[in-house]
Amino acid sequence: MEPTQAIPKVFVSRETEQEIGSGLRSLRPFQIEKVKGDLSAGTLAWVVGRTGKFIGQGFTNPGKEIAFQIVSIFEKEKIDAAFFEARVLAADEFRQKTLKFSDAYRLFYGAADGIPGLVIDRFNNICSLQISCPGVEKYKQAIADALMKINGVDTVIERNDFRNREKLGLAVKKGVLAGKARVQTVINEGGVKFEVDVMRGHKTGFYLDQAENRVAAEKYCFAGCEMLDVFSYTGGFGLHAANANASVTMVDMKEAIGQARRNVKLNKFEERVSFIEGEAFEETKKLISRPERFDVVSVDPPAFIQKPSEKARGKKAYHQINYNCMKLLVENGVLVTSSCSHFLSMDSFLKILGDAASNAGKVASIIELRSQSRDHLMPLHGGSAASYLKCAFLRVNSKKS
Ligand code: SAH
């Protein structure tokens, strides 16, 4: 028997074959016409055309929203530990050599780097990974061992504690996969230090997607400038403003403020940073009734729209918080406003901002439109939908009567 005959097969239409040729890597159930062989979760299988011609190979995920994840379009490529090592090290080399990231960066980003369902972030000496594909899960230890070969990496942890793992039939857990049991480190982001707790921080430990936006916001701050950082988390935008000598007020809930205080101390910015612990909508409303106004306001909320059914309510929330923040700006003030809601397009976000400005009695102009940092490469096939983060830098003025 020919060895390839034993490989399970997934049959797709000519149309899907063409899409795979253009970069599609995650197949939905409706795109699979027929299957042959044992296709239990995580099995290595071939995607073939109606005539049985090889198109790609990857992992099955039967019965799930994403039914198949293609990792290679080469018939002879062996999918083993060495394959994962090569992909991971190549992605790292691209970040370091071409993009010039060295200390903290998204080292591997799913389909854009050739393996859907694998995300790896690097925080100085610690790598943190997330897997959402049962086939990739089988190579978790091989991936961790490969990461240990990167100069400066001494620990690899998994942050596989997100809810979606259960739906995929994978254990929800976090822990050390390789190296030392240390879970805290300090990163340097454009001259600002952040303590990152990779076990407790959000997502893989820290929001790296905003890194270049935080650095970019610095250039609008100056000595004597008043900056307000709404939804400051561990101090992201505010610490960069303080780095440009601004006086900063950070607003977030109690738990996040604790880490922000430690980061302020780490950078010796205690004299120019103050904190408001509380609910952002309430606190910004209270600030409107006071006389102080700010030269720069950053507003970086959690995703208000997590599924399509939340669109209407989420849009209202974006409108309200941006309305409040625009009210808090001086003439010629700069608003740095973000939305990480996947289900909100840049155009819809800009429309909300325009309406919020008008209701607040303001006119706003776009200075910069930005997305996630360059280390978060996006698959071209996904089109603009792959770019989930929207960050607009606006100049805000009063409407002249
Ligand atoms: N700007 C940050 C990331 C913000 S993440 C950075 O650059 O790292 C979103 C933050 O919003 C979290 O810290 C969370 O604690 C906070 N948050 C969520 N809902 C909130 C609310 N209603 N009021 C105040 N803070 C809130």
Image (cartoon, grey):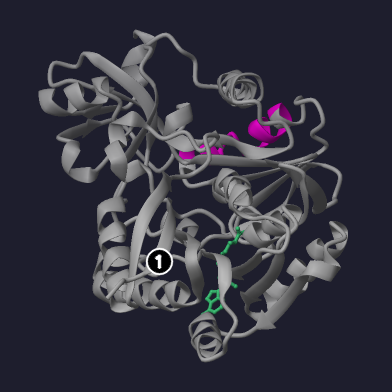
Going 30% across and 26% down the picture, which residue do you hit?
A: 23
Going 65% across and 58% down the picture, which residue do you hit?
A: 236
x then y, percent, for residue 248: 69, 68
Going 71% across and 78% down the picture, which residue do you hit?
A: 275
Q: Main secondary structure of the magenta part?
A: helix
Image quadrant for the C terminus? bottom left
Amino acid carrying label 1: it is Asn
- 138 to the left or right of 310: right
Q: Is residue 115 above or below residue 224?
A: above
**Front-most of residues 352 and 104:** 352
Residue range (magenta): 135-146
Q: Is residue 97 above or below residue 400?
A: above
Going 47% across and 68% down the picture, which residue do you hit?
A: 331
Q: Is mark 1 within 8 Å of ligand 1?
A: no
> Ligand 1 falls in which quarter?
bottom right
x then y, percent, for residue 244: 72, 52
Image quadrant for the N terminus? top left
Q: Is residue 79 above or below residue 373?
A: above
* Residue 50 on the magenta segment: no
Residue at mark 1: 397
Asked whether the viewer can see residue 335, the reply is yes
* Residue 142 on the magenta segment: yes
Q: Residues within 10 Å of mark 1 (few under 14, many from 20)?
A: many
Asked whether the viewer can see residue 315, the reply is no
Q: Secondary structure at mark 1?
A: strand
**Front-most of residues 214 and 91:** 214
x then y, percent, for residue 287: 55, 86
x then y, percent, for residue 43: 42, 34
**Front-most of residues 338 and 110:** 338
Number of marks in picture: 1
